[in-house]
Amino acid sequence: MNKLWIVTFETFLRQVKSWSFVMLILGPFLMLGITIGAGYVGAASGANSSNVAVISSQSTLRKNFLKENSADIDKKVTDEKVATKKMKKDNLAGYIVLKADNKRVTAKYVGTTSLSSSMKTKVNSFLAQTQQQLNMSQAKLSTQQLQALQQQPKLTEHIQEKAGTANLGKIISFWITVIMVYMVLITYTSITAQEIASEKGTKVIEIIFSSTTALKYFLGKIFGVLLVILTQILVYLVGGWGAYIFAENSSLTKSFVNQYQSLINSVMHNLLSVNLVYLLLGVVIYTILAAFCGALVAKVEDASKAAQPVIMLNLVAFFVTFPFQNNVDSIVVKILSYVPFFSSYFMPLRLINNNASTMEIMISLLILLASIILLAMYIGKIYQGLMLQTDDSSFWKRFKRGLSYK
């Protein structure tokens, strides 16, 4: 048992200390940081150039407008000459001049670009409200008449319990889940296949088999890769949570998070669930199969080709899920949610759409776990014969011979 853990930790340490693993871990965070940074710089540099100024000789009129509409307004500019200079330097999009007399309220916009639809709505709303107040004061109406004119229509909404958000959350969760499973499987099947194939037919492997059993050595390799996978998932969970906390408090993303909070919660609920277990177990069973394929290559030089059969199987499982995204009641989906190598894609699809009972989930997980254990034990028993097989025959002959080892 001691030798098993020696192989496990040696495999784990060799993988996590490699530059490829470091870049694999840091890549998503670097891309996220670059995206946020670029967005922040772009927003900061473009903020002034997209702002408008509000100018009026009547200070009360200007104050009333700014009291209700302060966003995208350069409050420091109060003079047309200053506004014109800033426009020439591309530090201001334009300026609005407000005027009012005893009969009418007017606004004039001067700018290098058209007034945005949101700002135009704000200006029109302010003008209509101010004009109404002016009209009522000129009409000299009684209190009862004023109250009658101030009556507003009422709109009442009855919305079903988060139905739209839930459906959108399911779609987003589906795509994130299948792409995440696919990418992780592609990465670690290649790593495992090359890890095994690189030792094919070497003197080192003969020495190792003379000091420990092939089963222990094989399981040690699998456990080592499994620890690497767990490390990556843990880093992503911690880093993802940190990114979410940052987004909640950052001025650049806070409004977006608040606006789509229910959608974000729905997606996170679908991802941080049993789906993670299926992701992990799916990677394990594909990793074991990749180790088998790595042991079947003819020589070390073929290590890069070792993972191709497993990658193709993963590719098939990945693309087969697409037609059933909106048809989770299909018998095909229900059958494949119990089939190893496919259940890691199809059962999460059913879970996201609340289409699987607890009993069905348990049966699917038990089948997947049993398949992993049986496959690992079988390949471990024939592992020595596979690794010491160095003849340059066809893949299918090596595959058939590999299955015959005891």
Image: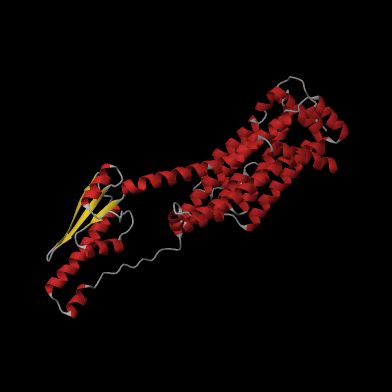
Q: Position of residue 136 (x, y in %)?
A: 16, 71
Q: Is residue 322 above or below residue 126?
A: above
Q: Residue at x 70, y 37 (%)?
A: 15
Q: Is residue 27 above or below residue 349?
A: above
Q: Position of residue 299 (x, y in %)?
A: 73, 23
Q: Position of residue 166 (x, y in %)?
A: 48, 56
Q: Identify which residue, 218 or 73, lies in the foreground.
A: 73
Q: Quadrant of residue 73?
A: bottom left
**Res 176 visible:** yes
**Residue at the outermost right position:** 210
Q: Residue at x 52, y 57 (%)?
A: 265
Q: Residue at x 32, y 53 (%)?
A: 72
Q: Position of residue 399 (x, y in %)?
A: 73, 28
Q: Is residue 330 above or below residue 195?
A: below
Q: Residue at x 64, y 35 (%)?
A: 19
Q: Quadrant of residue 381?
A: top right
